[in-house]
Image: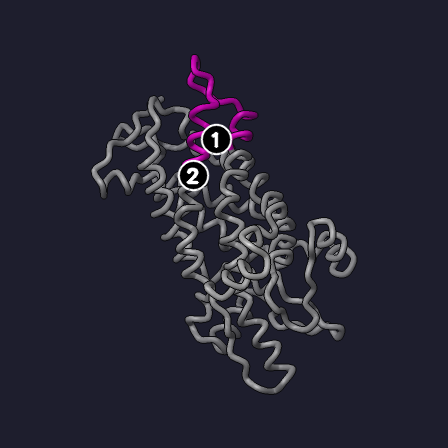
Amino acid sequence: MAENQLQFSILPKILNGGIAGMIGVACTFPTDLVKTRLQKQQIGPDGTKMYDGIFDAMKKISRSEGIRGLYKGSSVLILLITPMKAIRFTANDFFRFHLKDKTTNKLSTARQGLAGALTGVVQLVVTVPMELLKIQLQDAGRVAAMEAKQTGKPVTPNISALKVFSDLIRSRGFFGLYKGTFATMCRDVPFCGVYFPVFAKLDSFGPRKLDGSGDAKFYWSFICALSTASCTAVMVTPSDIMKTRIQSISKGAAGDKTYGSVKDAFKDILQHEGIKGFYKGGACRILVLAPTYAIIQGIYFLGVAEKIFGLKRDIKVVK
């Protein structure tokens, strides 16, 4: 990680983060869409629900909306994930590099956590609008299917990122894109504050590459990111549920609830859905985050940008 570096070059890190983000999202987007649908669905008075789990949701979505339906909103996510992941990984390395003890070249656990938390705050500038737009697009198919069931007539989802964006700007102004900022912060700050220090610790135990970079071998970084992201994803799933509900601002299906704050969402979910309500789509979230971070972390450390653009890699202390 960055505390072992003797220098800090920002351009390769931005490029590596962007490239890794695009690849990771492209591989896991259908599962992310299913996660959003499961988190949003409400159980009817008679106990009925649209989706009975991950595989049932996958089957119903692909049947009613086609394979392309599983990638609803992917263009927005892939477009915005590039700067988001570039910011996340670059910012974390930046804070780790500058928070380390200059004499020992080491970073305490507390400062590692601080670096991660600061990363979670910095990335909000891109994360909040990206998540808000993504949720509207991903949930459009579920809403259309609910309307079709109620009216008996087929309803085709009629929503686009441009339409959501323009409606928000027109009705709420620029800051309308930042609805759910506090809820997103409640998810991302703890996630980054835990994920990066734990990953760095596990990664430090692994075998190193022989190229003099000081990085762990690809398979070891992949395994460490997979296991760390799995545990951290479970930890922040309740915050992700509340964030998803708060950011659902487009016209929903009958019976859908809207929330104006984390406090309102927490009280209502606890009262009407119990503790289980905070973990809807939890397994799906693990299936999204774990491989996404494993892919991104592995590719980030491969130094793809340096190889493509002929950039010089940062020199690290090899121990």
What kind of secondary structure does the magenta stretch mostly adopt? helix
Which image quarter: residue 151?
bottom right
Q: Callout 2: helix, strand or loop?
A: helix
Looking at the image, residue 101 sits to the left or right of residue 173; the answer is left
The stretch of residues the image draws in magenta is 90-115
User: Given contact means CB atoms under 8 Å apart, are the residues at marks 2 and 1 in contact?
Assistant: no
Q: Three-letter amino acid code at disc 2?
A: Phe
Which image quarter: residue 223?
top left
The picture places residue 96, in percent across and down from the top left corner, at 46, 28
Q: Which residue is mark 2?
A: 89
Whether the magenta-drawn stretch holds residue 98 is answered as yes
Q: Three-letter amino acid code at disc 1?
A: Lys
Q: Is residue 141 above or below residue 265?
A: below
Looking at the image, residue 33 sits to the left or right of residue 219; the answer is right
Q: Which residue is mark 1?
A: 201
Looking at the image, residue 285 sits to the left or right of residue 298; the answer is right
